[in-house]
Amino acid sequence: MSNFPWIILGVFVGVCAALLIMKERAHWLASLEFELYPPPVPTSILATVREAERRSYEERSIVRQLAEEAQDVLVFTSPEIAYKMDFSVGRYRIKAQTVEAILPWAVENNFVVLRTTSAKSFSHALAYFSEQPGLNDWQAATYLEWLKKSHPLMASTPWSEIAANPELVAKLYSGYMGAGGDWDLWRENLTPGPIAVQRLGLK
């Protein structure tokens, strides 16, 4: 007996399941109500961070590159899992939970107005937003603004002055990468970490 009817049935069920998931995803995204107001981070600094992350990606092994590409694909199929796994995704390789952690600060400083009824739904969407260029720019800019404001020696420094000083840009990028896990040390001085210096080609 031919397996052809079962193959057709399997394809039909698969297509129906995919359409159902897409429908639920569309309703979920449509339920999110918010307004974004980008911080005044210079586009040159955003471009520097983006390029540094791109170069870092290209220097990784093929296996690592494939793994990161799989993470980006997962964002579209299941942003909730991408959020829970805290993957670095998008052009800026930023983590959804990193952005989520500064959301209260962003709301307080009027960089975002949340009208959605479910904060959890919005948090899960942050991973998905990382694959949307404009929204991803806002995520990176907001995080860089938070880093600047949280550093005692840079909080009052104009963005124009930071943009003109590669060492200060590298210092912010050190924080962007996680400050090596030592935030107290990162806030003590203006010396960028060696990885940031290397990625930005300062030495």
Image (cartoon, rainbow, N blue to C red):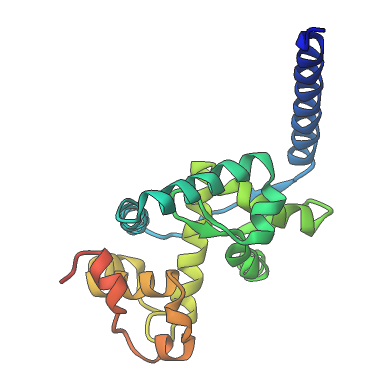
Q: Is residue 86 left or right of residue 198?
A: right
Quarter placement of the C terminus:
bottom left
- Which is more toward the observer, 55 or 12? 12
Report the residue at 65% width, 64% height from top.
100
Please tell me whether residue 203 is drawn above or below residue 141 in the rendered image. Answer: below
Report the residue at 70% width, 57% height from top.
123
Q: Residue 108 sits in which quadrant?
A: bottom right
Quarter placement of the N terminus:
top right
Report the residue at 42% width, 51% height from top.
63
Q: Residue 84 sits in which quadrant?
A: bottom right
User: In the rendering, at what x and y percent does residue 199 appear?
Assistant: 27, 64
Q: Is residue 31 left or right of residue 104?
A: right
Q: Residue furthest left?
A: 203
- Which is more toward the observer, 46 or 163? 46
User: In the rendering, at what x and y percent does residue 92 appear?
Assistant: 44, 54
Please tell me whether residue 61 is drawn above or below residue 148 in the rendered image. Answer: above
User: In the rendering, at what x and y percent does residue 127 appear?
Assistant: 62, 52
Residue 52 visible in rendering: yes
